[in-house]
Image: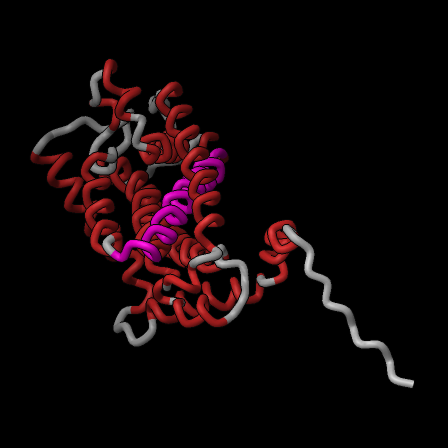
Amino acid sequence: MTEPLPELVIEAGRTEAQYWRDLWRYRELFYFLAWRDVLVRYKQTAIGVAWALIRPFLTMVVFSIVFGRLANLPSEGDAPYPILVFAAMLPWQFFASALTECSNSLIINSNLVSKVYFPRLVVPTSAVIVSFVDFLISGLILLGLMAWYDALPSWRIATLPLFIMIAFAAAMGAGLWLAALNVQYRDFRYIVPFIVQFGLYISPVGFSSSIVPDQWRLLYALNPMVGVIDGFRWAIIGGDVQLFWPGFLLSLLLVIFVLVTGTMYFRHMERSFADII
């Protein structure tokens, strides 16, 4: 007597209900993509992971000379200007790198996206993790600068993981928007570098946001990275550094908004990725 064949049951909405559970089921694919991108980034390079140190260090030197020496802009508290700049370079480089990697992640993995089912959210998330690895490596420079200038952190350093999470959310939210848009409109591969370059100049990376007049600070905080950068400086430098709480809370709300809407838009467009890409 033959055994009955297994039944295939198709229920409306079941895929949607299990989507977030599938993210956990496909965690090995997430590990593989992240590890592959880390290896590819530094493979066959003469100095390997040192590139993650050289770029932010040289940018910090240039900004310290231009804004600290030539423009003679003030630092925050008693912090040396290089520490002021690098405390902002850490979250900004992470955000900019994650934005670039995320926006191209689906296009780079087009063969995988068009042939195999898996939660597409795995792809941009793994791209952000690769940028986060660079962020951790770059943190070594900050430790070196603080040792060089004999700058000891205060108790506020314990709050740094909170601001790292906010930076991660900002990078993830904006990255999901651009990843989905780049599949449908390939013009965004030219727009993203402009966004990153323009964002560097309007964010308080090379200078303190305290130089912005009080009547404009809340408007300036509409840039979500302003709150992230100010939070990093408040946690790392400590001392007399003050956090502009109304602006920080506004930036935090915008980060949450971008993350939620970015996830919703990505999920909405996800069903058509395989057809468009």
Position of residue 145 measured from the top left corner of the image (x, y, whole percent): 30, 45
Position of residue 210 measured from the top left corner of the image (x, y, whole percent): 25, 23
Position of residue 30 measured from the top left corner of the image (x, y, whole percent): 52, 62
Tell me which residue sits at (18%, 38%) in the image: 201
Image-quadrant location for residue 273: bottom left
265 sits to left or right of 84: right
Residue found farthest to the left: 70
Residue found farthest to the right: 1
**196 or 160: nearer the viewer:** 196
The secondary structure that dominates the magenta segment is: helix
Tell me which residue sits at (48%, 56%) in the image: 271
Q: Which residues are magenta?
A: 159-186
113 sits to left or right of 222: right
- Which quadrant does the N terminus fall into? bottom right
Can residue 157 be spotted in the picture?
Answer: no
User: Does residue 126 sit above or below 67 in this rendering?
Assistant: below
